Amino acid sequence: MTCYLKENYDVIICGAGPAGLYAANCLQKASAGKLSVLLVDKKSPWKEPVACAEAVSRKIFSRYWTPKEEWIRQHLNGVYFTAPDMTRVEYFQKDCGLILNRAAFHHEMADKAAELGVECHFENRVSALAPAENGLWAVTVCSGETESVLKTKVVIDATGPGAKISRRVPGLDALETGDFDQESAIFAIAKGVPHSTRHIELLFGQRFFEGGYGWVFPRDGETVNVGLVGGRDFLKTHPPRATLEKFIQEAYPDAKILAFHGGAIPCGQSEHPIAANGVFKAGDSASTVNPISRSGIVEAMKSGKIAAECALEWLSATSEEERREIEKSAYDRWMKIQGKTHLNYSRGKSGFARISDAQFNKAAHRLASIPVEKRSIFRIFWAVLASSPSILWKLKSFFI
Ligand SMILES: Cc1cc2nc3c(=O)[nH]c(=O)nc-3n(C[C@H](O)[C@H](O)[C@H](O)COP(=O)(O)OP(=O)(O)OC[C@H]3O[C@@H](n4cnc5c(N)ncnc54)[C@H](O)[C@@H]3O)c2cc1C
């Protein structure tokens, strides 16, 4: 049974993934520990497996959290783009990315939050959120068989895809539901897959990856994370698990699959508000994933920071009008730093899904003829367009 330190909090953060953990750290740092902040999650954030391929851009991630060797699985020097005919094109950029051990990274973030004064309770599930008296929120939290109702001024909903806790709640009906353009991603941890420990590999082609892509990401030098995410429209023709199994059997006949994992990814930028009446949403629960790359770790941290900043301002606001303005600004702040780009990607996504295998192959052959040291992202982009000008038409929403 959990003993909470208080019955009334300034902020309750629901969900301790990257969004909630980062929000907790930002909030307590910015308020110099003066706020009462409770962080709850239905599981311990360091519990394995974390359903994720765990790749981040080193540069962007480092702006938010200092990477530590203890929780870095691999340092990356590039990407292999693999066409449907298995032509592999290398893009080299030293130290461009990291494969994290997310469980260990979450552990460090949670420890840091606790050190800063955040009250953390894991294995505690939020079962209900409801408006309470005096403009407070009542958050029902279950620990084993015990149910506690805690009150708070502000809620940060960082409960990930689907954001079930803030659905169908009076006063929150207009909010983003965290399932915008939701897709299924699946991966296997496997041995016996030839790979580079310094590169991630992204695979394209309609047979296995229609509307999405496949990946092979290194882990410990021996095992890989091999998976796929497909467009929502292709779920029936490409059931994720069967498609992945078939791909692995064909591409890596010597592979030994150790485990399968998967999860949902909300991959579109919605135009719904992400805050109302003192509830702020962050990360997947606010649909902040990059619609094309489907990366969401750093995005979750960025939006966790926005939620924390808004919560702080909201708590010191002196009028209802000011509070409504702060809530409205949460979406604008997200749009400014990331959402606008995501909106364009989201609109261009269907065009990306219509690029044919022949077009991918042609682009890969052209790229393969450029020496690796001359393959900048800019050059790759133009080589792809030049090999198939109709791609430009399919991707027009990226530009206009
Ligand atoms: C297969 C797969 C591969 C991916 N690969 C990558 C990748 O390589 N790189 C990348 O950047 N992104 C990747 N992503 C996306 C990334 O994992 C997410 O975008 C990211 O985890 C979002 O963080 P979050 O904090 O918003 O949500 P989450 O990480 O989902 O955290 C939400 C937390 O809320 C908790 N929770 C949920 N409901 C409740 C409740 N009722 N009460 C209490 N707690 C609750 C959950 O237990 C969870 O800990 C991948 C996703 C999938 C599914």
Image (tube, grey):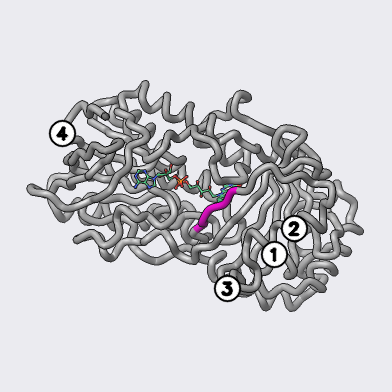
Magenta span main SS: strand
Q: Earlier in the sequence, mark 3 or mark 2?
A: 2
Foreground pick, 157 / 326: 157
Separation of disc 3 and disc 4 at Cα?
Answer: 46 Å
| Residue identified by numbered label 4 | 7
Foreground pick, 132 / 340: 132
| Residue identified by numbered label 2 | 203
Taking the spot 35% from the left edge, 28% from the top edge, the residue there is: 29
| Residue identified by numbered label 3 | 233
Q: Earlier in the sequence, mark 2 or mark 1?
A: 2
| Residue identified by numbered label 1 | 209
Q: Tag 1: residue type?
A: Phe
Q: Which residues are magenta?
A: 261-265
Residue 391: name its quadrant.
Answer: bottom right
Residue 26 vertical position relative to residue 290 in the rendered view, above or below: above
Separation of disc 1 and disc 3 at Cα?
Answer: 12 Å
Taking the spot 33% from the left edge, 31% from the top edge, the residue there is: 121
